[in-house]
Image (tube, rainbow, N blue to C red):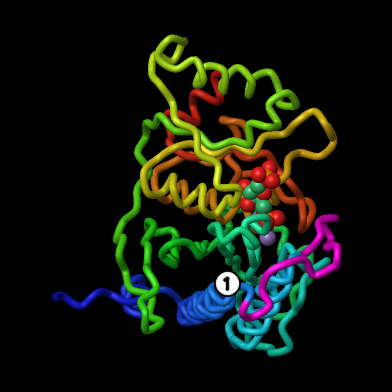
Amino acid sequence: MTARTDLAAHLASLALPQALSQTLTAAAAACVEIRKIVSGGALVGALGASGVVNVQDEEQKKLDVISNDVLTDMLLACPAVAGVASEEMDTVQPATNPTGEYLVLFDPLDGSSNIDINAPVGTIVSVLKAPSATPTEADFLQSGRHQVAALYAVYGGQTMLVLTTGQGVAGFTLSHDGQWLMTHERITVPADTKEFAINMSNQRHWAESVQRYIDGCLQGADGPRGKNFNMRWVAAMVADVHRILMRGGVFLYPWDKREPNKPGKLRLMYEGNPMAFLIEQAGGKATTDGKQAILDVTPTELHQRIPVALGSANEVDQIAAA
Ligand code: AHG
Ligand code: MN
Ligand code: MN
């Protein structure tokens, strides 16, 4: 059997700055630790609520807190990291070492509502260049186009890590002996699809254009689209995006009318941007509304929310035209 490329060899082949390789290696190692805790479930006290409400006004699960601690500790111990920011922390945490070159933003545990039912969850990571070795919150507010790397780990039937550094998208599967081995060398998203992902229970709250788009899909072969669609919703963006990277589709979490001043549910800096970078690098489109690229949004707040419509390029165009 031919030996597979491991993550270290892949990073070496990309000729990245050494500090960036170190940062990505630390993030990937943290995901291995989180996987162990996810797998332990009730045996290691990983299920249930923590009793604390985070800066998002959402009740943290124990696993949100544990995953956040693992990533924070392992990244800040890496000399290449100048600071971290997370869904689960009010503000940014600068590193104490003076050598850091990169800022790392993360959603430590995406899909928290899946934890207690043993459904897929994941970790999402965005990496930016640090403007200074002692970064402030303002230093993190760079548009997604400035990302130098993005990755996610999905803790599903298999544990996979999917990575871009702006040179395409590669996928790795965690082996039983704890190595990230390349199993998907160049991931691409098909331009066309017959599959969409949206939380249908919010239908009555959506903008008219989103209602029109989904209605067209639901009419299937009898409607304007002239083909039948399938629907999937894992309730973890990381798993829904993974499906799209594996076989195409679109994922929407749109603005809705309930709280008109709230742009959407998902967060720009550690959900929208890293996933948009991966999707674009795989040949798909990642937008707020079918038209505006998520990567071009200028951030104003660390925990800013945005609408998301991403996936197969031609289908995202259909969302824009609806
Ligand atoms: P998180 O667990 O990090 O707060 O993110 C959950 C997000 C996202 O992963 C998912 O797509 C969405 O919330 C699920 O929303 P619904 O509760 O509407 O299904
Ligand atoms: Mn999330
Ligand atoms: Mn989360």
Q: Quadrant of residue 9?
A: bottom left
Q: Position of residue 247 (x, y in %)?
A: 36, 43
Q: Nearer the viewer, residue 90 or 148?
A: 90
Considering the numbered disc 1 on the image, is that residue within a helix, a strand or a loop?
Answer: helix
Q: Residue at x 61, y 84 (%)?
A: 74
Q: Is residue 118 above or below residue 41?
A: above
Which residue sits at x=44%, y=33%?
Answer: 195
- The picture places residue 167, in percent across and down from the top left corner, at 38, 59
Identify the residue at image location x=60%, y=88%.
Answer: 79
Q: Which residue is mark 1?
A: 38
The magenta span reads 43-60
Amino acid type of the residue tagged 1 in the rendering: Val
Q: Does the magenta run of residues contain 191? A: no
**Image quadrant containing the C terminus:** top right
Quarter of the image for residue 113 reads bottom right
Q: Can you give x and y, in whole percent of width and height, for residue 271 in the image?
A: 63, 54
Can residue 150 be seen?
A: yes
Residue 234's spot in the image, x, y percent? 55, 47
Quadrant containing the N terminus is bottom left
Q: Residue at x 68, y 78 (%)?
A: 45
